[in-house]
Amino acid sequence: MPLATPWQHGYALARSLRHALSYGDSRFDFTAPGQPALHYWETAMPSSRMEGLVSAGGPACAITSQRRETAKRFVLARALGDYIGRSDAGLGILTSMDTARQARSRAFAAELLAPAESLRPRLADQGVNVHDLGQEFDVSTQLINHQITNHGLPQPYSSSAHG
């Protein structure tokens, strides 16, 4: 049965890859032995909406230079998702545009880097906050907030809301 939305396809691809790599619920490390080889170089892009280019022949990419480390990890994960999720051969372009392919790659990246089912039990801990989770998974707090919203996860505990 086909998945209904591009982001559901992206989530499923990421879960499948994490499972195939026996990754569990920990931080995804692109540099760990046994991980998919993802070669990249940083460069200026010809448009401010372009975030990366994914090779047609393998998981290699060029990404926008001058990014925070968490943003770089997100674009690398998007590139990997674009490569393994594509149905047509050819160059992949990662952009900020709102298309099915871009939505799939963003969902893949979010789920690969900070899986919803890994966040769920952590969010039940009253001492954890979005910043802590971002640091644990080496992602932005924005990515954590998107995962919470998109997956209907419990809101993190906020001491200011309780006293």
Image (cartoon, rainbow, N blue to C red):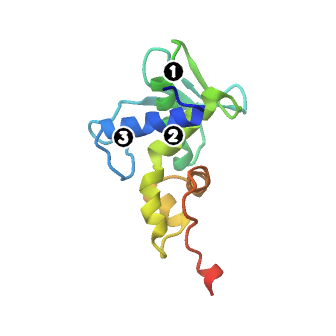
Residue type at tag 3? Arg
For label 2, the crowd category at 10 Å Cα-Cα, with few meaning under 14, some 14 to 19 and many 20 or more, is: many
Q: Secondary structure at mark 2?
A: helix
Expressed as whole percent of the image width and height from the top left, the position of residue 91 reads 55, 16
Residue type at tag 2? Ala
Are the residues at dot 2 and dot 3 in contact (C-beta closer than 8 Å)?
no
The answer to which quarter of the image holds residue 8 is top right
Horizontal relation, residue 58 to residue 151: left or right: left
Expressed as whole percent of the image width and height from the top left, the position of residue 129 reads 53, 69
Inter-mark Cα distance, 2 to 3: 11 Å
Residue bearing the label numbered 1? 86
- Of callouts 3 and 1, which one flags the residue occurring earlier in the amino acid sequence? 3
- Seen in the picture, residue 71 relative to 105 is either above or below; the reply is below
- Seen in the picture, residue 147 relative to 107 is either above or below; the reply is below
Q: Residue at x 32, y 45 (%)?
A: 23
For label 3, the crowd category at 10 Å Cα-Cα, with few meaning under 14, some 14 to 19 and many 20 or more, is: some
Residue bearing the label numbered 3? 18
The answer to which quarter of the image holds residue 43 is top right
Question: Which residue appears farthest toward the top when viewing the image?
Answer: 89
Q: Residue at x 37, y 35 (%)?
A: 17
Q: Residue at x 71, y 32 (%)?
A: 98
- Of callouts 1 and 2, which one flags the residue occurring earlier in the amino acid sequence? 1
Inter-mark Cα distance, 1 to 2: 14 Å
Q: Secondary structure at mark 1?
A: loop
Residue bearing the label numbered 2? 109
Q: Secondary structure at mark 3?
A: helix
- Seen in the picture, residue 150 relative to 6 is either above or below; the reply is below
